[in-house]
Image: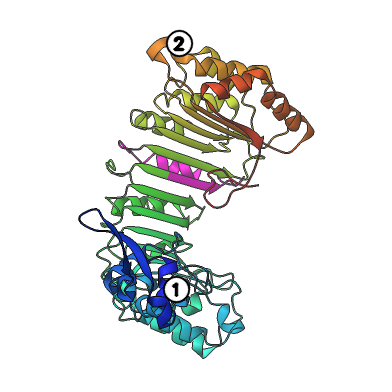
Amino acid sequence: MTTPRSVRLSDRPTEYQNQSTLVRGADGAVSFTPINRFALTLPPELTSEIFLHCLPDTEFIRPDDALNAPLLLCHICRQWRRVALATPGLWASLFIDLDWFGLLDGVDDVVCDWLSRAGRMPLSLQIIDSDPGESSHLPELHTALKMIGNLSSQWQNISISVPPGYAQDLFPVAATFPRLVRLSLDLSSDDDPEPLPPTLKDTFSLREIQFYKMPFILATPLETLTVYRSEMMNVSQGLNVLRNCANLSCCTLSLVYLKLEDAITSLPPLVNLQTLTLSENLCDDVESLLTTELLRHLTLPALNHFTLKFEDSDDVPDADISHIILFLSRCSPKLQKLTLCFLPTSEIGLLQVLDCTQFITTLELQLHTPCDNVLTRLTFDIGFLPRLESLHIVHPTQSAPTPEAMFAMLFWRWYATENAGNDCAQLRSFQYDHAESEAMNFFQASMITDPIYELLEDSGMDLSIKKIEWSGEETWYISW
C-alpha cells in the first residue's frame, strides 16, 4: 500500500529517489536493493478503490470541508490529485446550502464541476435553504438547481428542504427517476404551505419516502415503497397510504384534524408492516383521538415495534383509549417493542395498556403521571411484562418514586430468573431520565451513591439515572 511517506518521496527530486532498502530474497538472504520510484505508486485503479474507502461516514459530503476526502486527497500530490479527480465515486455525494449563493462567488461553478466529475454515478444530494429568500433572485442559483434537476435520472438518495419556488428548477416536466431509492422532501413555507406537488415519474426503484406537509404528492406508484414517513395528514389520508403501500415494513404518520375527510373504511391485514409510529397534537375540541380512529381500522399481524406520541397532553383530560387496547391485543404475539409518549390517560389506564402487551422485551415511556404503580407491578407481579429486558422511563415531573421502590424493582427483575425461573426474563437495561429540580437531583444522588446501585452495575446491568438530555432528532421522546 502506498503510504504518505512514500508518496512524498516519489515527488521529491531525483537524488531522493535513488535510495536503497533492505529486502529478503527467495533464499532468505537479506540485501540492499535500490528503491524504484514506480514501486511507490500503485496502479490508478487500485488507488481509486482505496480513495473510495477514505470518504467520511457522513451521508452527504460538504464541499467546504478540505480536511476530509475527496478534497483532502487533491492536496497531497499531483498524482493523487489526478487520480482523485478521475474517480467518479468520490464526487457522487454533495451537501448544498442555497444561502451560500448569496455569500460566496462561484458556488454554481463548484456545484457544476463537482457533479460533472461524478459522471453517470448514482447521486446522493442534500439541498437546504438555511436563510430562505436571501438568494432566490440570483440567476446562478437557478442555473445550478436546473443542472441538478436535469440529472434526475441519476438521483438515488435525495433530501430537499427548500421553499416551493425552487420546485420548478429541481423537478422539470420531463424529469424521470429510475434510480431514486430514497427521497425526503419539504417544499413548504409559511407563505405557501401547500405547494403544487412535483410529478415523480418512473420511480421503479423507490423504497423510502418522507414528506412534510404534502402527502398528496403520492400520485406515483406506491407498491415499491417499504418505508413511508409523512407529517400533517388526516386519518383518511393515512389509511389511503397504508392501503396503497402493501409492501410497507415501516411507517410514520403525524396526524392532524381536518374537518373535510374522505369516507373511512377498514383495511385488510397488512402482513408486511413491522414498525408503526403515530403522533398527534391533542386538541380540546376534538371528540376522539385521531390515532384511535386510525387504529380501529388496522390489523397488523407482523407488528414488531409500535410508537404512540401525544404532544401537549399534560392539560388534556383522560381520553378513551379502548381502541388502543384492542389494537395492541390484536398485535400482542409479535410485538417486541412499545414506545408511549404522554399517553392521555391515568396510571390505571397505562397499566391496562401494558397488561395487553405481555410479549414485549423493550418498553419506553415518557410520562406526566407517576410511575409508582408500574414499578410495584414489575416488582411483585411475575405475570406483568414477563419478557421485559429493557426499560427506559422519561419523567419531566417534579416528583419521583422513592429510591427504595426503584431498587426493589431493579433488584427483583435482575434476579428474576432465580426468583421465578423461566417464567420471567432478566431486566438487563434500565434508564431513568428526570427533570431538573432539587427533589429530582436529590433522588439521583441517592440512587447512584447507594451500594445496591454499584452491585447491580458490577453484576452486569446497564444502568443510567440522569437529567434529561436532548440528543437530537433521533431521540425517541418529545422535547418540551
Q: Nearer the viewer, mark 1 or mark 2?
A: 1
Q: CA distance from mark 1 to mark 2?
A: 64 Å
Q: Amino acid at mark 1?
A: Arg
Residue 11 or residue 299, whichever sits in front = 11
Above or below: residue 226 compared with residue 16? above
Residue at 30% of width from left, 53% of height from top?
245
Q: Position of residue 423 (x, y in %)?
A: 39, 14
Q: Secondary structure at mark 2?
A: helix
Image colouring: rainbow
Q: Earlier in the sequence, mark 1 or mark 2?
A: 1
Residue labelled with disc 1? 8
The answer to which quarter of the image holds residue 333 is top left
Tell me where the magenta segment starts and ends, as one range.
Answer: 277-303
Q: Say few, some or many: other residues with alpha carbon within 10 Å of mark 2 (under 14 / 14 to 19 / 20 or more).
A: few
Give yes or no for residue 287 being in the magenta stretch: yes
Residue labelled with disc 2? 418
